[in-house]
Amino acid sequence: MKILETIAQRISAATGLPAGEVAAQLTPPKRPENGDYAFACFPLAKTRRGNPAALAQELSAAIKAEPPIASVEAAGPYLNFRVERAALIAEVLDDARSQGPGWGRSDAGRGRTIIVEYSSPNIAKHLGVHHLRSAAIGRAICNLHDAAGWKVISLNHLGDWGTSFGQLICAYKRWGEGKPPEELTVDELQRLYIRFHAEAKAQESLLDEARAWFQRLEAGDAEARRLWQCFKDASLKEYERFYNFMGIRFDRFTGESGSAPEVDACVERVKAALAGRKTKQGEDVCRISDNALIVDLSDDDMPPLILQKSDGSSIYASRDLATAELRHREFGFDRCVYVVGSEQKLYFRQVFRVLEMMGYEWARDCVHVDFGLIKFKDAGTGEVRKASTRRGEIVMLEDVLDEAVSRAAAKIRDNKERFEESDDQDAAARAIGLGAVVFGDLNVRRAKDVIFDWDSMMDFEGDTGPYVQYAHARVCSILRRYGAEVPAAPDAGLLKLDDEFALAKEISRFPEVVKDSAQTCEPCVLAGYLLKLCAAFGRYYNLGNRDRDLRALCDDPGVSAARVALVDAARRTISNGLGLLGISAPEKM
RNA sequence: GCGCCCGUAGCUCAGUAGGAUAGAGCGGCGGUUUCCUAAACCGCAGGCCACAGGUUCGAAUCCUGUCGGGCGUACCA
C-alpha cells in the first residue's frame, strides 16, 4: 500500500471521512519544516461545528505514529505528518524503476476516447510563430491524455476551404504568369494572396470575381478543383517538413473540404431540428435574414450563427457543425477538444450551442481549449498588436526554429569538450534549440497573450527548456560514469541528506502532476513541476562541489549505489516529463 | 456600448475547485569551479497581489463596482 494512502486511511479511520477524499486533501505544506503532508482541519471542523485547532489536537492523539508515519503533530488547525524517509524514498525508487517508460502514467481516463484537433493551419500560407503555440499545446495535450489513460485521436483539421481559395484562384489566373500550378510554392501562393488583397482595395470587382471562383469550386468545377488541389499539395509538402522537424504526428489530416459534401444535409438537419422553434421575440430561430440562413441565438445573448451566406456559398460554421457530426459518428468520443486561439471563443460557444439545439447530448463534451495570441511589438511605434498575413507581417516559424538551433549549436561549440567525436552534436543542437522554443510556449498558462521577442524565446538559462535538459544531461553523466547497472533494490536508509529526501518527494509527485496537467489541459502545470524538480536536483547535485563525500559517485559503494538509484529515478522523471511536453532529453550538452 | 480574457517584484511569469509567513526566472549587487558538466548552485535587494467595497474563522484566489490592456461582437477562418 502506498504511503499516502496509508496516511489517508488512518485519518479516515479517525474521522469517518472517505479515504479517497482525505487523500485528495493531503498536500505537502508550503514549508517543508512543517512536515511532509498536511491535513487542514477547517472543512471538517465546519461540518462538525467544532474548533479546527482542537480537532487537530484530538486527531493527533488519535492517530498513532506507526510506520510508515514517523510523527503526527497538530500545528494550529493543521495536522502535520512526517513520514519515514527511507520508506518514502524506497517507494519512489521502486515505482520509477519498475514502471520505466510508464512512470507517471495513470488510468484516470481508462475506457474513454478524446479527440484533439490542433495546429490546423490555413493552407497556402507559410507557418508563422503563432502556429507553434497551437502545435506545442495540442501535442502536449494529446500526450498528457494518453498518459492519463485516455484513447487519443489527434486531428489536424486544415483550413482548406472557403472564399479565400476563390481569391487565390482569381489571383493565380491574373498574375500567375502561366506557371504550371503543380510547381507553385507556398511562397508564391502567399505572395498571390497578399497581392490579391492589396489590389482588391482599389478594385472591388475582384472580390466578386473571387466569389465566383469559390462558387465554381463548391460546384465541383474541374479547373477550380485542380488548382485548389495543387495549392493544398504544395502547402502540405511544406507543413510536413515542420511536423517532422517537431516530431509531431497526427492520426489523421482532415480538412474543412472533407465536410463540404455533408454540409447541405447537415443544414437540413439544423432546419428540421429547429423547425417551428421561436425566439422570445417571436421570430423563427432558424430563418433567412438579409438573404443569409442563420440560427438566431439572441436568447443566449449571442449573435446569430450563419449557416449559409447570402450568395449561397457555404461558410465555416456549417462546415464545423457537419465535421462535429462526422467525428461523433465515427469515433463516438467522450470528449472533443479544439485547440484554437481565444479569438474564436465566442464562435465556438455558438457552434456548441447549435449542436446542443440540434439535440446532440454530446455537444457538452465539446471543449474549446483556447490560448492567447502571439503579438508583435512594432519596432517604430512600440505598439503591440497581432500580425496579419494579408499585410505580409508574419514572423516565419522556420526562421525562428533555424535561429534557435543555430544559437544552440554555437553554445555546444563553446562546450565541445563535453562531447566526443561520435556524438551527434547537430541532433543535440536541434533538441536544445527546439526545447527552448517549445518549453517557452508551454511554461505559461494558455490564456496569456505572448509578445514575440527573439531573445526571450532563445533563452537557454534560468527557467527554460534547456535548464531542464541540462539537469537531465548531468544526471546521465553521473550514470555514465557509474558504469555499472543501476541497482534495483538499494538501501534507501543510506540516503540521509535533506536534499536527497526533498528530491525524492518531488519525484513522487510526478503521476499526480501529469493527471492534473491533463485534466486542466494546462501543460504549464507539468512544465512548472519539471522546473521545480530540476531545481531540487540542482541543489542536491551542487552539494558535491564542496564535499566529495556528498557526491553520488562517492567512496562508499553502498551509499553510492543508493544515490545512483535516486539519480536514475530523477532521470526517468525528467525524461518522461519532457517527452510528454514533446521535448527531447539529450544525454549530453 | 455589450460579452469574454488578462492585471502579482524594474521585466517575464507561477501560485486561482478559499487555507500556514505570496514564489521562480531575468535584470542588479555579492559569493561558489584543482572539474560526479558553471546552460549550474548559494546569498542580498526588490510586493498596498490594479483600485474600492463585500462574503468568510480565513481572500492574490469567490461576488459587486471602478480603472487599465487584449480579443470578440452576421455572411474571413
Image (spheres, rainbow, N blue to C red):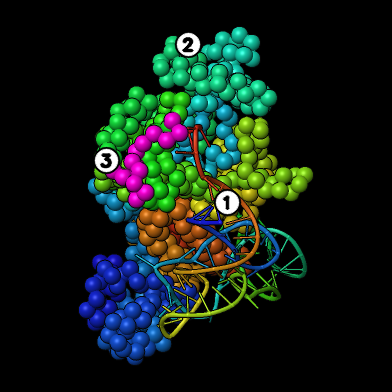
Give the amino acid at mark 2: Glu
Protein chain holding label 3: A
Question: Considering depth in this image, is A149 or A93 the residue closer to the camera?
Answer: A149
Instruction: Identify the residue at horizontal 57%, vertical 41% (top origin).
Output: A130
Residue where numbered disc 3 is placed: A276
* Residue A223 disc label: 2
Residue where numbered disc 1 is placed: A449
Q: Secondary structure at mark 2?
A: helix
Of the numbered discs 2 and 3, the one sitting upstream in the chain is 2
Would residue A355 be visible to someone looking at this image?
A: yes
Q: Is residue A406 above or below residue A181?
A: below
Foreground disc of the pair 1, 2: 2
Protein chain holding label 1: A
Protein chain holding label 2: A
Q: Secondary structure at mark 1?
A: loop
Q: Is residue A103 above or below residue A426?
A: below
Would residue A541 be visible to someone looking at this image?
A: no
Give the amino acid at mark 3: Gly
Question: Considering depth in this image, is A172 or A310 the residue closer to the camera?
Answer: A310
Foreground disc of the pair 2, 3: 3
Q: Magenta includes A152? A: no
Q: Where residue A149 sits: x, y (%)?
A: 30, 49
Of the numbered discs 1 and 3, the one sitting upstream in the chain is 3
Magenta span: predominant SS is loop
Give the amino acid at mark 1: Asp
Q: Is residue A483 left or right of residue A378?
A: left
Magenta stretch? A277-291
Foreground disc of the pair 1, 3: 3
